[in-house]
Image (spheres, rainbow, N blue to C red):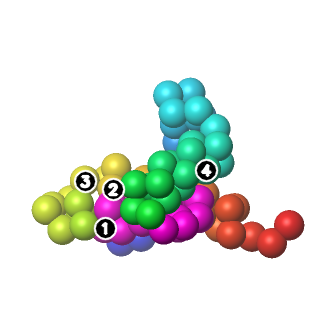
């Protein structure tokens, strides 16, 4: 059965809960991209960070069901789309 409220719940988490605990997601992904780029010695973009985080959540879901993995992956896709969207 599809939970039609899942995307809305993920957006609520992103806009309310995660913003309070983690700060502005766009700025956070820019900082992570800069750090990963320095560590890897290769350019990583903020939208690539978000897409990689989706893959982390997918990998975690292979260990068993945790609703948080699904909610967070939707949130990361929303962030990735916002970062990748042409202005």
C-beta proximity under 8 Å, tags 3 and 1: no
First in sequence: mark 1 or mark 4? 4
Q: Residue furthest front?
A: 41
Nearer to us: label 3 or label 4? 4
Which residue bears the numbered disc 1? 58
The kind of secondary structure element at disc 3 is loop
**Quadrant of the snapshot with the N terminus:** bottom left
Which residue bears the numbered disc 3? 66
* Position of residue 86 measured from the top left corner of the image (x, y, whole percent): 80, 72
Nearer to us: label 1 or label 4? 4
Distance between the Cα atoms at labels 2 and 1?
A: 7 Å
Distance between the Cα atoms at labels 3 and 1?
A: 11 Å
Residue plotted at (48% across, 49% down): 35
First in sequence: mark 2 or mark 1? 1
Q: The magenta stretch spans which residues? A: 42-58
The kind of secondary structure element at disc 2 is helix
First in sequence: mark 3 or mark 1? 1
Magenta stretch encompasses residue 31: no
C-beta proximity under 8 Å, tags 2 and 1: yes
C-beta proximity under 8 Å, tags 3 and 2: yes
Residue plotted at (61% across, 50% down): 30
First in sequence: mark 3 or mark 4? 4
Magenta stretch encompasses residue 48: yes
Q: Is residue 53 above or below residue 30?
A: below
């Amino acid at each position: 059965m599809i939970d039609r409220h899942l995307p809305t719940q993920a957006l609520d988490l992103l806009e309310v809960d995660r913003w309070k605990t983690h700060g502005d997601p766009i700025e956070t992904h820019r900082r992570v991209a800069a750090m990963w780029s320095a560590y890897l010695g290769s350019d990583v973009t903020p939208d690539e960070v978000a897409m990689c985080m989706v893959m982390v959540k997918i990998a975690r879901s292979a260990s068993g069901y945790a609703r948080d993995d699904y909610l967070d992956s939707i949130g990361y896709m929303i962030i990735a789309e916002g970062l990748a969207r042409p202005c």
